[in-house]
């Protein structure tokens, strides 16, 4: 087991917090175009982190945190398909990194948190293999620019969500619905891009380490017969394994590949030379974003339907998810368990089990996101977000138990340090330890959870030293 500094921090993503969508020669991202064209709530200003980053980092440091996980916006840094660098984009992140270091905060950098440059989306986005090579070039620019100052790098954030939401449920750009063949090709290109970036990192002898961040939904069922076990395995492959196992072991889960072939999907795009790159370049660590488990049951019938609740308490529809011939979500069971207004089940033990299950890959692990989205009135005297405190406390408790039990878990990041734009859930779904008053110049107001987290970190550090 590795002896590393334990990281206590919080996490954001460029599009969700920076704002400044068109300043300093930033190119358009696929999210800019999609949200503008459809006249939807957007991140043009978001938390205006671009102009408030010093205050935000100071608050993190005063809040006892020693790490900040943020992402770099590809279209801010690379101007066009030819790969020309935008020096102003580099300068912004260089200042942000320096500000972190000045405040005793480890920058924990994600290269891709969903804001693909529109000039690449115009060429087919992740369906186009060229994008994997463009990603490699973009990462090399970052490695070179920030080598020696950043020690923790992640290639991607949650491949599952941007691909499945973009090509299955269709609620994220490019909004294709139930295009399973496209999903498979995008997954392949993203995992290839991940390996290509790791290859460059090693060849360039960059200091520090590089990993990938996956969404992790711990899979459970309330029965244990063969059909249920198979449904669990299928759901685990669908939700987790193709990201985590492929990144850690260097090969897609073989039973999943066989199943796809049997179902008639065309896998002829997979080339031996790419699979070798994926095989030879695995991660140094894995980041797990854990919020919620999934309870599944065997497939009963009907076509594939993948739904997401982007309307929170206003959602009146049915969330039943079916993946044809793979599994179904057991909604009846999920409804009975504690959940947030967006229907996400709250189950802290799922975090412990996530760590335990991923320990078989023998790489250091981090919980790179965990937190609670809520509707909040921030215009009161003191923001008493006790539900968030309870949520984080219980999850941290499970994390510390996992550490105590000997699992190689090395850090915890709350999503998020301050309120930000929650994609299709907009700004009213608040996750922050610090409130952002979006109507009043994005004024920052610490919530009770901010002070609670500061004290929790302090107490745990003392305990960890014992
Ligand atoms: C997952 C994603 O990484 C992030 O972008 C999102 O806003 C949070 N979790 C909350 O849903």
Image (cartoon, grey):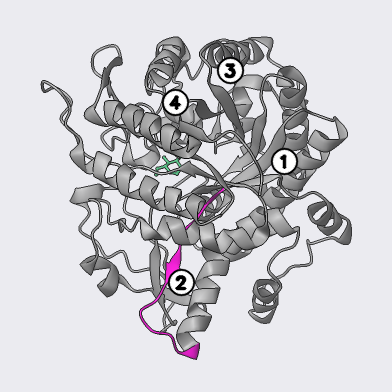
Label 1–label 2 contact, CB within 8 A: no
Would residue 107 be counted in the magenta stretch?
no
Q: Residue at x 44, y 82 (%)?
A: 298
Give me the disc on residue 26: 3
How crowded is the residue under tag 3: few (<14 C-alpha within 10 Å), some, or many (20+)?
many
Distance from the alpha carbon under mark 3 to that under mark 2: 38 Å
Percent position of residue 3, x then y: 64, 40
Percent position of residue 308, x then y: 36, 56
Left or right, 204 with respect to 230, comes to: right
- Between disc 4 and disc 3, the foreground one is 4
- Between disc 4 and disc 1, the foreground one is 4
Q: Residue at x 59, y 50 (%)?
A: 408
Tag 2, which secondary structure? loop
Residue wearing tag 2: 304
Distance from the alpha carbon under mark 1 to that under mark 3: 19 Å
Residue wearing tag 1: 131
Distance from the alpha carbon under mark 4 to that under mark 2: 43 Å
Residue wearing tag 4: 65
Would residue 216 be counted in the magenta stretch?
yes
Furthest residue in direction left, as rendered = 381
Magenta-drawn segment: 214-226
For disc 2, does the CB lie below 8 Å from ligand 1? no
Whether residue 419 is visible: no
Tag 4, which secondary structure? loop
Percent position of residue 106, x then y: 57, 24
Left or right, 84 with respect to 435, comes to: right
Q: Earlier in the sequence, mark 4 or mark 1?
A: 4
Distance from the alpha carbon under mark 4 to that under mark 1: 35 Å
Distance from the alpha carbon under mark 1 to that under mark 2: 28 Å
Left or right, 186 with respect to 456, comes to: right
């Amino acid at each position: 087991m590795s002896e590393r500094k334990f990281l206590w921090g919080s996490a954001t993503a460029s599009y969700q917090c920076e704002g400044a969508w068109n300043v300093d020669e930033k190119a358009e991202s696929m999210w800019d175009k999609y949200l503008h064209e459809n006249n939807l709530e957007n991140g043009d200003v978001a938390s205006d982190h671009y102009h408030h980053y010093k205050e935000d980092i100071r608050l993190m440091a005063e809040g006892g945190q020693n790490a900040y996980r943020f992402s770099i916006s590809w279209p801010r840094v690379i101007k066009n398909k030819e790969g020309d660098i935008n020096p102003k984009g580099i300068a912004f992140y260089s200042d942000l990194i320096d500000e972190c270091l000045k405040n005793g905060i480890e920058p924990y950098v994600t290269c891709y948190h969903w804001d693909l440059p529109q000039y690449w989306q115009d060429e087919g986005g992740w369906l186009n293999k060229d994008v994997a090579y463009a990603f490699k070039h973009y990462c090399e620019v970052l490695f070179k620019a920030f080598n020696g100052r950043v020690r923790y790098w992640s290639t991607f954030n949650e491949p599952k969500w941007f691909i499945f939401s973009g090509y299955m449920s269709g609620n994220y750009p490019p909004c294709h619905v139930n295009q399973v063949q496209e999903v498979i090709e995008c997954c392949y290109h993203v995992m290839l891009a991940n390996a290509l970036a790791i290859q460059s990192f090693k060849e360039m002898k960059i200091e520090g380490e590089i990993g990938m961040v996956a969404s992790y939904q711990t899979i459970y069922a309330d029965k244990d017969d063969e059909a249920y076990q198979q449904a669990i395995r299928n759901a685990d492959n669908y939700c987790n394994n193709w990201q985590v196992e492929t990144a850690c072991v260097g090969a897609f889960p073989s039973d999943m590949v066989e199943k796809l072939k049997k179902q008639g999907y065309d896998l002829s795009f997979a080339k031996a030379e790419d699979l070798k790159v994926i095989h030879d370049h695995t991660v140094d660590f894995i980041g797990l974003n854990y919020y919620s488990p999934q309870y599944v049951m065997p497939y009963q019938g009907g076509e594939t339907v993948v739904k997401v609740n982007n309307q929170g308490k206003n959602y009146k529809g049915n969330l039943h998810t079916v993946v044809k011939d793979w599994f179904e979500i057991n909604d009846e069971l999920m409804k009975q368990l504690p959940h947030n207004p967006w229907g996400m089940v709250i189950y802290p033990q799922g975090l412990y089990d996530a760590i335990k299950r991923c320990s078989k890959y023998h790489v250091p692990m981090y919980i790179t996101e965990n937190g609670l989205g809520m509707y909040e009135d921030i215009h009161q005297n003191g923001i008493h977000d006790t539900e968030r405190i309870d949520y984080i406390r219980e999850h941290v408790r499970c994390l510390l138990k996992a550490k105590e039990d000997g699992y190689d878990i090395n850090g915890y990041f709350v999503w998020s340090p301050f309120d930000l734009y929650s994609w299709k859930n907009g700004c009213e779904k608040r996750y922050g330890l610090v409130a952002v008053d979006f109507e009043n110049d994005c004024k920052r107001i610490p919530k009770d959870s901010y002070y609670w987290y500061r004290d929790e970190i302090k107490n745990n550090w003392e305990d960890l030293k014992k």
